[in-house]
Amino acid sequence: MTTIHQNKSLSRPKDQAVIAGVCAGLARRFGMRPTTVRILFLLSCLLPGPQFVVYLVLWLLIPKS
């Protein structure tokens, strides 16, 4: 039986980044697929709130891997 070691630290991966890698980093951290997190982010943009500003702040705060 093979076990997959997932990195649970929060960082922006270069290999899965579409724009900045924020969604891919969050997906890796919480054990989700990057596409799922990207869709959830896009759907959240339909709601009122500072989602885009949060994305920019996370882009600045989360280190590259």
Image (cartoon, helix red, strand yellow):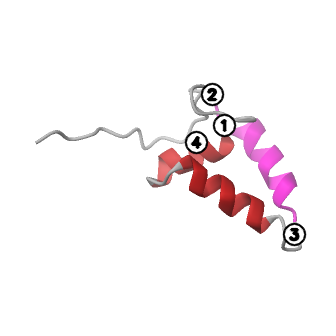
Q: Judging from the image, what secondary structure is the residue with disc 2 in?
A: loop
Start-end of magenta stretch: 50-63
Q: Is residue 54 above or below residue 15?
A: below
Which numbered circle lies on residue 25? 4
The CA distance from mark 1 to mark 3 is 21 Å
Residue drawn at x 59%, y 50% as measured from the top left: 35
Q: Is residue 40 magenta?
A: no
Q: Disc 1 vs disc 4: Cβ atoms closer than 8 Å?
A: yes
Q: Are marks 2 and 3 in contact (CB under 8 Å)?
A: no
Along the horizontal axis of the image, is 5 left or right of 61?
A: left
Q: Position of residue 14 (x, y in %)?
A: 60, 26
Say few, some or many: other residues with alpha carbon within 10 Å of mark 1 (under 14 / 14 to 19 / 20 or more): many
Which of these two is toward me, 63 or 41?
41
Q: Position of residue 53 (x, y in %)?
A: 87, 53
Estimate the x, y position of residue 15 in percent, counting from the top left: 57, 26
Q: CA distance from mark 4 to mark 3?
A: 22 Å
1 to the left or right of 52: left
Q: Earlier in the sequence, mark 4 or mark 3?
A: 4
Q: Earlier in the sequence, mark 4 or mark 2?
A: 4
Q: Quadrant of the C terminus?
A: top right
Q: How far separated are the C-alphas under marks 2 and 3? A: 26 Å
Q: Amino acid at mark 1?
A: Gly
Q: CA distance from mark 2 to mark 1?
A: 8 Å
Label 1 close to label 3 by CB (< 8 Å): no
Q: Are marks 2 and 1 in contact (CB under 8 Å)?
A: yes
Question: Which residue, given by chain and number where applicable, does mark 1 sit on?
Answer: 21
Instruction: Name the residue that disc number 2 marks.
Output: 64
Q: Amino acid at mark 3?
A: Gly
- Return the residue at label 3: 49
- Please identify the dominant SS of the magenta region: helix
